[in-house]
Image: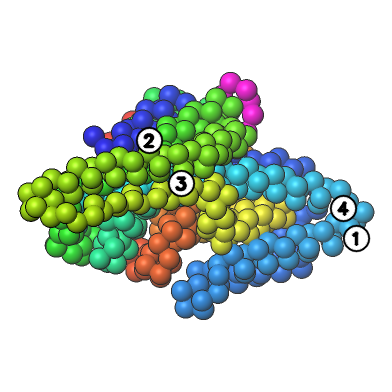
Amino acid sequence: MTPVVFFASCLTVIFTLFVPSLGFAAEHVDSISASHLLDLTKHWAGYLSLVVFALAYILAMTEEVTELKKSKPMVFAASLIWIFIAIVYAQGGMSEQAGLAFRASLEGYAELFLFIMVSMTYLNAMEDRGVFDSLRVWLLSKNFTYRQLFWITGFQSFFISSGCNNLTTALLMGSVIMAMGKGSPRFVMLSCINVVVASNAGGSFSPFGDITTLLVWQKGVVPFADFFTLLIPAIINFVVPAAIMNFFIPKERPAAVKEAQVMQRGGWVIIFLFVLTIITSACFENFLSLPPAAGMMLGLTYLKFFSYYLQKTRHAHAHQENLSVDLTDVIIDYSDAVRTNDSAVVKSNKADEETPFDIFQKVANLEWDTLLFFYGVMVGVGGLSFIGYLTFASQHLYGSIDPTIANILVGVVSAFIDNGTIMLSVLTMEPNISQGQWLLVTLTAGVGGSLLAVGSAAGVGLMGQAKGIYTFTSHLKWTPVIALGYAASIGTHFLINSRFF
């Protein structure tokens, strides 16, 4: 068992035992918007905010064509939305309410930012130490075809995400896929789509696999054990599009690797520290009632201290390695000289010096465009929620439409708006629906984000990781296939969970 395979197994167990709930801004924003005094849904500020947000989203989705970084229009739109809100509230002498609402959105984003920053830093560190290359070499040494690797990474994503958040799962598997598919861009593109679908589906049947299921469980509308009745629908959601995409995966095998890839010094320790960081984050949330991001930041210090140790011991370690290599060369060269009666001078080959490890360089190499895009989306959606549009949409959705259709539409909308925000709006409204319908909206909100690359954190994260290969457009081409899996999972839910309706 390779270090990364062991690490992935540990993550699954750890996340099953400890629940790191990530508190998005939606919870804070909705609590404020429930008591705000101004309804701006029919005000010029509300209309302008909708137009600005829609235009920014279109620009973000067409990044591949315009070559305009997706964070730029989204951050600009979020800023404009809150300017509109602040102007209206200032005119009414209520600037304080607008300020509190914005700070609530900012607080939620700050927690998400710190959580993602630490996760990405650890992933960059593990990549630097050759952890993912080790997994790549292990998989390639088994002589798997691209199609077999496609299914292996898909199922790993599905089950890991049942306990781990979909973003961390996608970034972990994306690093492996990028390493294995260097010679096949099509394999990388389709595997990234597969990972996004699998990660979102895997989190939809576990009470702590996704923010949507966690919110529903904490609200008490669905008992703990009943969430697992969504396992089969979730598998169908993942398998149906994967089975179709399978035929478009190259039949070739990647170049075989016969020699084991040795991780650089510290690889095993960094894996352990990442697992320890996740445990710390879970303990902060469950036992100390502190944000998971606070635990992640403590975990970052584990890596920073270890980085200090690696830097201080690098030259001593290299010197020891060189002594070992020199001794080996002397023995070999002396033997050759005796055998050939050659009195040539013995060579002395120095071992390759260990790559310097700088933790701050790993932070600098984060995908900042993705992190700022998250800022634009979360703060912008927070503004629209404060204006009153999410509450307005929820009331009309369940007030005049059949619950089944409404819950299916919720899943479609979650491809455009954060699913945690959507689910929190539904829970806040407290529609009078059956448990089967609550399970349905849990499923659709969880997997609906797979319909678009920007519909989930997993998709956005992978777009940053696989630049130019996995893009919004490449994902959009397969949206009809993903929609088949979406429809099939809903049908399966009605078939096997009819007792709940």
Structural crowding at the residue carrying mark 2, measured as other residues with C-alpha within 10 Å and reported as few (<14), some (14–19) or many (≥20): some
Residue bearing mark 4:
95
The mark closer to the camera, 4 or 1, is 4
Using the numbered discs, state the Cα–Cα distance from disc 2 to disc 3 in whole angstroms.
Answer: 11 Å
Disc 1 element: helix
Closer to the chain start, of discs 3 and 1, is 1
Using the numbered discs, state the Cα–Cα distance from disc 4 to disc 3 in whole angstroms.
Answer: 44 Å
Residue drawn where x is 85% and y is 56% of the image? 89
Residue drawn where x is 40% and y is 43% of the image? 318
Residue bearing mark 2:
268
**Residue 136 within the magenta-colored segment of the rendering:** no
Q: How far across and how far down the image is residue 259, in percent?
A: 18, 48
Using the numbered discs, state the Cα–Cα distance from disc 4 to disc 1 in whole angstroms.
Answer: 8 Å
Residue bearing mark 3:
125
Q: Which of 39 and 19 is in front in this view?
A: 19
Q: Can residue 385 be seen in this view?
A: no
The kind of residue tagged 2 is: Trp
Using the numbered discs, state the Cα–Cα distance from disc 2 to disc 4 in whole angstroms.
Answer: 52 Å
Using the numbered discs, state the Cα–Cα distance from disc 3 to disc 1 in whole angstroms.
Answer: 50 Å
Tell whether 320 sits left or right of 244: right
Magenta stretch, residue numbers: 286-292
In this picture, is 467 found above or below 407? below
The kind of residue tagged 1 is: Gln
**Residue 287 within the magenta-colored segment of the rendering:** yes
Residue drawn where x is 67% and y is 66% of the image? 77
Q: How far across and how far down the image is residue 442, in percent?
A: 45, 41
